[in-house]
Amino acid sequence: MRDKIQAALKSSKADYTEIRVEEREATTVAYRGKDLETANAVIDAGGIVRCLCREGGWGVATFNDRDELLAKVEQATECARVVQSEEPIDLAAISVSEDRIAVKLAHDFRGVSMADKKAIVEAYNNILLGHSDKIVDTSCVYRDTFGHVFFANSEGTFIEEDRPMITVRVVAIARDGDNVQTASDSRSGQRGFDFVQGHEDLTRAVAQRAVDLLSAETVVGGQYPVVVNQQLAGVFIHEAFGHLSESDFVYENPRAQEMMVLGRRFGQDILTVFDDGALSGLRGSHKYDDEGTPTGRTDLIENGILVGRLHSRETAAKMGEKITGNARATGYRYPPIVRMTNTAIEKGETSFEDMIKEIKLGIYACDAYGGQTALENFSFSSAYAYMIRDGRIAEMVKDVILAGNLFTTLMNIDAIDDDFQWSESAGHCGKGQGGLPVAFGAPHIRIQDVVIGGK
């Protein structure tokens, strides 16, 4: 493979050429209710060539037959020549890397039989089905993938990397007449088979939460102080703020340029937000991004001040800023674009007890069920929530929708817990190319004056 890639690079007449070749094997087992819905094993292989002609632009060609690699380099070069770019394209300089990132899993899921994989997801599904007669439907999914990726460019970089991922997800649907409620949870990471075992208590908690939501009252809409748990805080910072930090969006959007001015105060001194793709085992972690740039920590907000943003080689050159290693592609069918990796709010110093004891009437919002953003405006649904009354967690409520302006909301974060957690759930980012693995991290946070939709 290396000889083929290097021969193809030498044949290129473009100013810059890169080749990414991927081989992936995956297994999926899924139950829906009592039925085994899916049990399959697939192998997928292919690659992508990107060529840059600075007097033209980018040319891209994808392939599945690696014997076509020379022809695809020529095709991508021709495409690059005919593109009419509005301005010359430069790439920020990076060091040449030659590396092999091999992964040894403690219990490699590739050596586990399909029967054993089926058994574990079947057991979780049976727990859901047997928990209560109010559980009317379930979804339980096991999935593993193991990818082997080659990346090389005409500057001399050559990288091989193993990319494993394993996931289990459980969903319970409860019903009482016309009242239907859903609860779910998942575990996912670059880990071995042991990582998805032993989640019986998690599964029971999901089933019970679906049942509990049947009797929960819909929250009364209004303006409340809200304490947000780690999972929802992480999703919030990814969706509402993280995408605004992706520099391709900023560079191409005049309104975003007005908002995302470095040095602008976004929050109080207690607020620090960062993205870090170099942390071991998390869903968004890799030693290099899909342009061969080393990953690492990028501070985005430091003590309330906007100090950085995320870059590819192209956007870093366009904006004259430090490259960050955030060019990522969903797979070989796509070119890399600027994407988050593992995005988080840094821990604070306030305990959870101190955070809620001052609240006369408020809401404790947990986990994320869905949401949307439009520039600085956002709307998120929590998966479940509780009222806070006189400094104590009280009854469960449902249909809690948090909405507002990002910048106002960030400024209203007035307490941050010291209980930071990286989420181990199956986080995906869908920007432009479909689901790409990411991770969220956060402690509990308290936000004043949040508008809550409800009855």
Image (cartoon, rainbow, N blue to C red):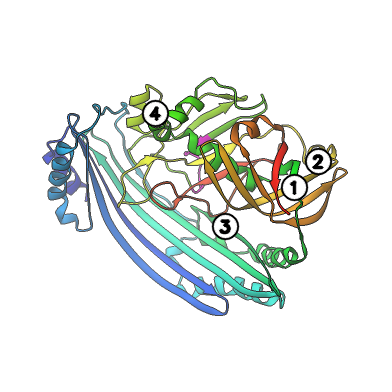
Horizontal placement of 429 versus 414: left or right? left
Please state which of residues 408 and 317 is positioned toward the viewer in this rendering: 408
Q: Nearer the viewer, mark 4 or mark 1?
A: 1
Tell me the kind of residue under disc 2: Ile
Q: Nearer the viewer, mark 4 or mark 2?
A: 2
Please state which of residues 168 and 209 is positioned toward the viewer in this rendering: 209
Q: Which residue is mark 3?
A: 187
Marks 2 and 1, Cα distance to the nearest angstrom? 9 Å
The quadrant of the image that shows the C terminus is bottom right
- Secondary structure at badge 2 equals helix
Horizontal placement of 356 versus 213: left or right? right
Where's residue 362, x and y in %? 79, 44
Task: Kindly indicate whether the residue at mark 3 contacts the one at mark 2 (C-beta within 8 angstroms).
Answer: no
Where's residue 69, x and y in %? 16, 50
Tell me the kind of residue under disc 3: Arg
- Residue occupying image coordinates x 81% and y 41%: 356
> What range of the chain is rendered magenta?
275-283
Residue 296 lies, with reference to residue 48, above or below; the image says above
- Secondary structure at badge 1 equals strand
Q: Which mark is residue 364?
A: 1
- Secondary structure at badge 3 equals strand
Residue 307 lies, with reference to residue 3, above or below; the image says above
Tell me the kind of residue under disc 4: Ile
Please state which of residues 314 and 205 is positioned toward the viewer in this rendering: 314
Q: Earlier in the sequence, mark 4 or mark 1?
A: 4
Q: Which residue is mark 4?
A: 323
